[in-house]
Amino acid sequence: MSGADPIRLYRTVRLIRRFEERAIELVRSGHIVGGIHPYLGQEGIAAGVCAALRPDDVVAGTHRGHGHVLAKGADPARMMAELCGRVTGLNRGRGGSMHAADFAAGVLGANAIVGAGGAIVTGAVWARRRRGEDLVGVSFLGDGAVNEGMLLEAFNLAALWRVPVLFVCENNGYATTMPVADAVAGSISARAEAFGIRASTVDGQDPAAVHASTAAALARMRADGGPEFLEARTYRFDAHHTFEHAVRLDYRSPAEVAQGRSRDPVQIAGSRLPAAERAAIDADVEAVLEAAVADALAAAEPDPATALEYLYASGLTARTGGG
Amino acid sequence: MPRLSYRKALNRALADELARDEEVFLLGEDIQVAASAVTAGLLKRFGPERVRDTPLSEQAFTSFATGAALVGARPVVEFQIPALLFLVFEQIVNHAHKFPLMTGGQCAVPVTYLVPGSGSRTGWAGQHSDHPYSLFAHAGVTTVVPATPADAYGLLVSAIRCDDPVVVFAPAAATELRADVSDPVPVPLGRGRVHRSGDDVTVVAVGHLVHDALAVADELAGEVSVEVFDPRTLYPFDWDGLLGSVARTGRLVVVDDSNRSCGIAGEIIATVVEQVRLHAPPRRVTRPDGAVLPFAPALDRAVQPGRELLRHAIAHVSKDG
Ligand SMILES: Cc1ncc(C[n+]2csc(CCOP(=O)(O)OP(=O)(O)O)c2C)c(N)n1
Ligand SMILES: [Mg+2]
C-alpha cells in the first residue's frame, strides 16, 4: 500500500480545522443554534482514516462528527448549511451537527448516541457484502463509547460474522469531563482483543501515521473479512461542546491543555509540504469556506409547514398537533 | 376449506416474503430451530445467511438490522420476549424511526420487529407478560396487533413490504387460534375491520381481545346490539373506520391490554370524543395502572382486561344518555 498523498492529508486537516473555527464563529453569532462538539485537535484521525477508504466504503460518525463527514467527501458548503439549519443542508436542515449524513458519500451519519454507530455500520456492510460488493466500513467512536454495552455487542457480531468494519477509537482522554483512567477498567484495546479483534494503536495527531495504520488494517480486512480496531491517541483542543465556552468546567489543567495542543495535526501535516504549497492550500480552503458560509447564510430556512416531511419513508402522514 | 393456524400464518408470511424478495432476511435468537415455531422449516429452505441465529445481544442486532435496512435490506427481527422491546426501545425509536426525518429523506428503514407471543403467557409471570404496543404507537412507529390467522399473515406481509419500521405483536392468547383460510392475502396497514356489525355500541378490541369482545357480543345479542371494531393497526389508526362506526352507534367501549395511563384506549376515546357527540360517556377496560402480571394464574387473569369488565362497561354505556 503506497503512502498517503501529503497534499491531500494536509488539505483535509486544514479544511476541517478551518471549518470548525468558522462554525464556532457562527455559534457565537447565533447562526448555528444548539452549539457543536468541535473536532479541533482530532483532525488527523478523520483525514488519515478516510484517505485510505474508497468512495463506496461507508463510515458512521459520532456526536463530534464534522471531521468524519468532511473527510469522507461531503460538500463543506452543504455541511455548513446543515449546521445553520438551511434547506440546502446535507439533511435539508433536519439533522444539524449531530446527525449530519451524506449517504451518497458513504456517510451513514454522525450520531448523537454514544456507541450507537458500531452496530449500524456492521449491519450496513454485511448487507451490501451479501450482494457481492467488497466494501468495508469504519465506525468512529470515542473513548467513552468503549463502556457502552451496545458497542461491545457490536464487536461481538462483527467478529463472529467476519464483517470488515474498522472500529476507530478516538481516545482524546475524556468522555466530556470523565478521564479515561477513571472510566475504563482494563485497557481500551483489550476490549476489542477480547473478541478476537486485532487491535493496534497509533498517534492520532499524525495523519500520515493514521493513514498508514488504517491502510494496513484495511488491506488485511479486505483480504480476510474480519473487523479490526484502531486506537488513535489524540487530544481535544477545545471544549467538549461549545456550551463550555460560556460555562467553564474545571477538569483539565492549563498545563495539560498546553501540552496537548503542542502536537497539532495541522502543523504536523503542514510541515511536510513546501511553504508555498501549503499557502496555496490554505488560500483555497479559505475560499471554499468563505463561499460555504456565505451560501449557508444566504440559503432559505425550511418552511415550518414542512416540519414533518420525511418522517415516514412509506408516505404515511402523521396527524398534526391539532388545536 | 383448509384450516390455518395463527402461527402457521406467520410462518407462511415469512416464507412467502423470503421467497419473493432476496433482500428479506431474518434475525433472532434460536430461530434456526424455530423455538417460537414461526420460523419452522425456513433454515432448510433459505439457508443460514437469511435465517440468522444471533448471540444474545438485542441492542446490537436491532441496530445491525437498522444498518442493513439503511442500505436496502428488509430485515425481520424476532424477539423471544415482549420485554426485550424495552431493551431495544432506544434502537427502534431513537434510531430506526428517526433516521428518515433526521437525514432529510436520504434513507428508509424497512425493518419488521416480530414478537410471536406478546401479552400474558400464563405462568411466565412478571417479566415475560408485557404488551407494550401503546409505547410504539405513542412513539409513532407503525404497530400492528393481528387478532386472526388471516390478519396475522396479511399484516406481517404488509409489515415486511412497508418502507418504515413496523412492530408486529402476535398476542400469545391468539397464537393457538385456527381459522378457515384458503388463500391468505396481504392486509393493508392502517385499515381496521368490523368483525361484527351492531347498532347500539361500538366495542373497539385490540388483538386477542377481539375474540373476547365477539363472545360478549354474542352473549348480549338479545339485549344490546354490539359492533366489534378491530383496528388491527394501532398506528397509524383507522380513524375514519372507527368514526364511521361510532357515528352510527353513538356509544363507545374500548378493551385494550395496555396499562391504563397513556394506553391506546385513552387515545382512542380522546380522538372519538373530539369529533363525535356520544350518547353516553365512553368506557375503557384495560390493565390497571402500572400493571405487573403476578405469577399465580388467578392473579395473572385478575389484572388482564376480561369479559366480565367488558360486559359491565357495555351495560354502563348502554344505560346512560
Ligand atoms: C449513550 C449516551 N450517553 C450519554 C450521552 C451524552 N454525551 C454526549 S458526548 C458524551 C461524551 C462522549 O465521550 P467520548 O465517547 O470519549 O467522545 P468525545 O466527546 O470525547 O469525542 C456524553 C456523555 C450520549 N450522547 N449518549
Ligand atoms: Mg473522549
Image (tube, coloured by chain):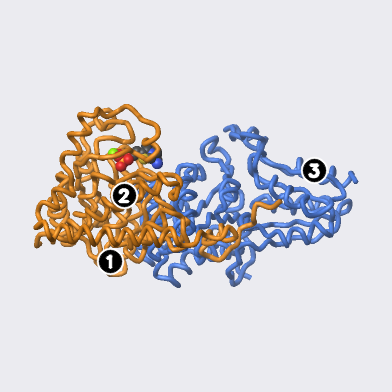
For mark 2, what is the residue? A20
Colour of the chain lettered B: blue
Q: Is residue B48 visible?
A: no
Looking at the image, residue B155 sits to the left or right of residue B86; the answer is right
Which residue corresponds to the image point at 20% horizontal and 44% vertical from the top-left? A231
* Numbered tag placed on residue A73 in the rendering: none
Give the mark nearest the N terminus, 2 or 1: 2
Q: How many angstroms separate mark 3 from mark 1 (CA)?
A: 60 Å
Q: How many angstroms separate mark 3 from mark 2 (CA)?
A: 62 Å
Q: Is residue A163 visible?
A: yes
Residue type at mark 2?
Glu
For mark 1, what is the residue? A56
Q: How many angstroms separate mark 2 from mark 1 (CA)?
A: 26 Å
For mark 3, what is the residue? B313
Residue type at mark 1?
Asp
Between residue B19 and residue A125, name the one nearer to us: A125
Looking at the image, residue B104 sits to the left or right of residue A258; the answer is right
Residue A250 x %, y %: 32, 27
Chain letter, colour orange: A
Name the element at disc 3. helix
